[in-house]
């Protein structure tokens, strides 16, 4: 879930750099056993998160605080409400109370709209914004684990072990949604919960290393979610999402995803 927050503010995170700073144990990419092991590890992650209850989620309604960072320094946090209806509906609101104090972004399939309360502007998303949103979904943890958008072209294998700190390593699974896109999922070797995602993305003509880190797993409605999610760009923190509540499979009206006829009709 939290896909949207992940992708709206930094439109999510990407690939382990070829020459890591710490000693690593690489698995043989040609060994079929590592394909089997990679898939087995993902199954263990799903089981650790909640098994069939996790993989069967239909809707997510989450609240919390989004904190932007500037040059690694935290700024003023903003309240958010994130509503997801799988497979392709999402509405995120930032701020609360009066319309002028809120910002709303809604995506439905290949369409979307925005409301800027500061300027009282309601408009359709641009093709570039919709493209960025769709691309960001490929790097969303929950969509990866739950197989949202999964196809036969997705390659998965055990990549090896990476050092977390002296004497402690993480299992790393390489997930390739496409030949040119790689996602490295670091897993705790004891409880199999995700520690972080690492990937690269082109920005301004240059490759940028992005990282999403997961902390403080808490059970909500029988499913484990990280309560804190941090986002880094080339090693510098850009934002933090701190969840305050997560509710699963609430009934969600389709009306909230429809673009209002005017600013006055915003609810």
Image (cartoon, grey):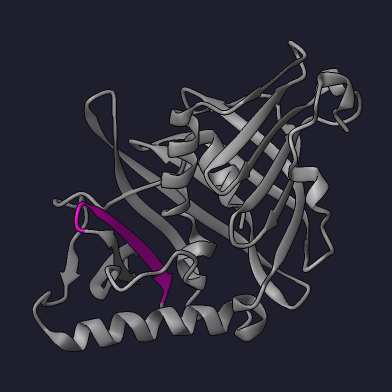
Q: Residue at x 41, y 70 (%)?
A: 187
Indicate left or right for 198 with 4 as reference.
left
Q: Is 184 inside the magenta-drawn segment? A: yes
Q: Residue at position x 62%, y 85% from top?
A: 52
* Residue 195 position in % (x across, y down): 46, 63
Left or right: 46 in relation to 123: left
| Total marks placed | 0
From what the image shows, is residue 158 above or below residue 254?
below
Between 52 and 237, which is closer to the camera in this rendering? 52
Residue at point 65%, 72% (across, down):
224
Residue 250, image quadrant:
bottom right
Residue sitting farthest toward the front: 261
Q: Position of residue 23 (x, y in %)?
A: 18, 61
Identify which residue is drawn at 38% across, 65% down.
186
x and y percent of residue 257 in the render?
74, 44
Is the residue 144 above or below the residue 158 in the image? above
Asked whether, in this view, residue 179 is left or right of residue 126, the answer is left
Residue 12 painted magenta: no
Percent across and percent down for residue 251 are: 84, 63
Q: Could you tell me which quadrant the C terminus lies in?
A: top right
Principal secondary structure, stretch drawn in magenta: strand
Magenta-colored span: 179-188
Residue 108 appears in the rendering: yes
Choose between 185 and 147: the one closer to the eye.
147
The N terminus appears in which quarter of the rendering?
bottom right
Q: Nearer the viewer, residue 225 or 216?
A: 225
> Is residue 190 among the parts visible in the rendering?
no
* Residue 226: quadrant of the picture: bottom right
Query: Quick check: 142 above or below 78?
Result: below
């Amino acid at each position: 879930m939290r896909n949207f927050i992940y992708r709206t503010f930094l439109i999510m995170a990407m690939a382990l750099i070829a020459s890591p700073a710490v000693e690593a144990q690489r698995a043989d990419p040609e060994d079929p056993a590592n394909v089997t092991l990679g898939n087995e590890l993902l199954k263990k992650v799903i089981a650790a998160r909640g098994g069939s209850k996790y993989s069967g989620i239909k809707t997510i309604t989450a609240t919390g605080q989004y904190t932007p960072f500037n040059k690694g320094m935290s700024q003023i946090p903003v309240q958010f409400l994130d509503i997801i209806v799988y497979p392709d509906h999402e509405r995120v609101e930032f701020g609360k109370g009066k319309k002028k104090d809120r910002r709303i972004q809604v995506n439905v399939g290949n369409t979307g709209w925005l409301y800027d309360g500061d300027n009282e502007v309601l408009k359709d998303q641009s093709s570039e914004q919709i493209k960025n949103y769709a691309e960001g979904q490929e790097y969303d943890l929950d969509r990866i684990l739950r197989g949202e958008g999964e196809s036969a072209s997705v390659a998965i294998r055990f990549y090896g072990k990476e050092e977390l700190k002296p004497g402690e390593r993480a299992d790393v699974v390489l997930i390739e949604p496409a030949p040119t896109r790689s996602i490295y999922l670091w897993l705790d070797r004891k409880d199999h919960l995700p520690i972080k995602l690492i990937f690269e993305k082109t920005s301004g003509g240059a490759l940028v290393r992005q990282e999403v880190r997961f902390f403080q797993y808490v059970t909500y409605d029988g499913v484990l979610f990280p309560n804190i999610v941090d986002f880094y760009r080339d090693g510098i923190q850009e934002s933090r999402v701190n969840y305050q509540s997560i509710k699963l499979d609430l009934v969600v009206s389709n009306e909230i995803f429809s673009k209002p006829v005017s600013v006055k009709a915003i609810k």
